[in-house]
Amino acid sequence: MQIVTGEFEFDDNPARVDRDRLWRFLSQEAYWGRWRTRPVIEQQLDSAWRVVGVYQRATGIMVGFARAVSDGAGFAYLADVYIDKDFRGQGLGVALVDVMIEQGPGAAFRWTLHTSDAHGLYQRFGFTQPDRTYLERPGRHQPTS
């Protein structure tokens, strides 16, 4: 699925993802998973249920990304959502989450995510604090700052 909005294009073709650019962002700028090695990132990409990239139409450069893990039937986990800092403030983050969640095959799914920021963005799409039925076993990876 390709969606064009102004000077940007949203595409869920996994072959189009700029893995080097993604690796640079996740290993140097993302606070949430710097414990991951390049092979781990590659494995996560290869096993993702869906990925969506944001591409600048004039250059083809990937300026944003989101990944989802899912059972393909009713549940999905949203991960690695980002927009390059030079392109923030243009509504691309909202559009990216919209394309991933509302305009894709998982529009009716139960979605989860972990984040320590951008709560307002995710609340627009119905994300709330978990209820009393939600339990979680934290990972054993030590996050780096």
Image (cartoon, rainbow, N blue to C red):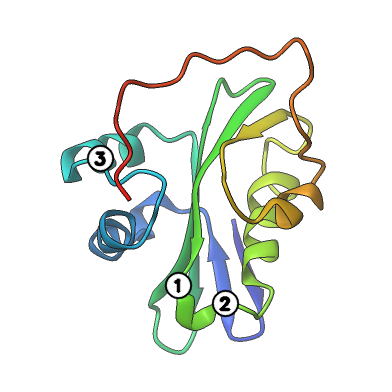
Which of marks 3 and 1 precedes in the sequence?
A: 3
Measured Cα–Cα span from mark 1 to mark 3: 19 Å
> How busy is the neighbourhood of tag 1: few (under 14 within 10 Å), some, or many (20 plus)?
some
Q: Which mark is residue 60?
A: none
Quadrant in which the N terminus appears: bottom right
- The kind of residue tagged 1 is Asp
- Give coordinates of residue 63: x percent, y percent: 45, 72
Measured Cα–Cα span from mark 2 to mark 1: 7 Å
Q: Which mark is residue 36?
A: 3
104 displayed left or right of 8: right
Q: Residue tagged by mark 1?
A: 84
Q: Is 107 located above or below residue 123 in the figure?
A: above
Q: Residue tagged by mark 2?
A: 88
Along the viewing direction, whichever of 17 and 140 lies nearer the viewer:
140
Instruction: Report if the CB atoms under discs 2 and 1 are less than 8 Å apart.
Output: yes
User: What residue sits 57% from the left and 65% below the top?
Assistant: 10
Extreme-front residue of the structure:
145
145 displayed left or right of 49: left
Which of marks 3 and 2 precedes in the sequence?
A: 3
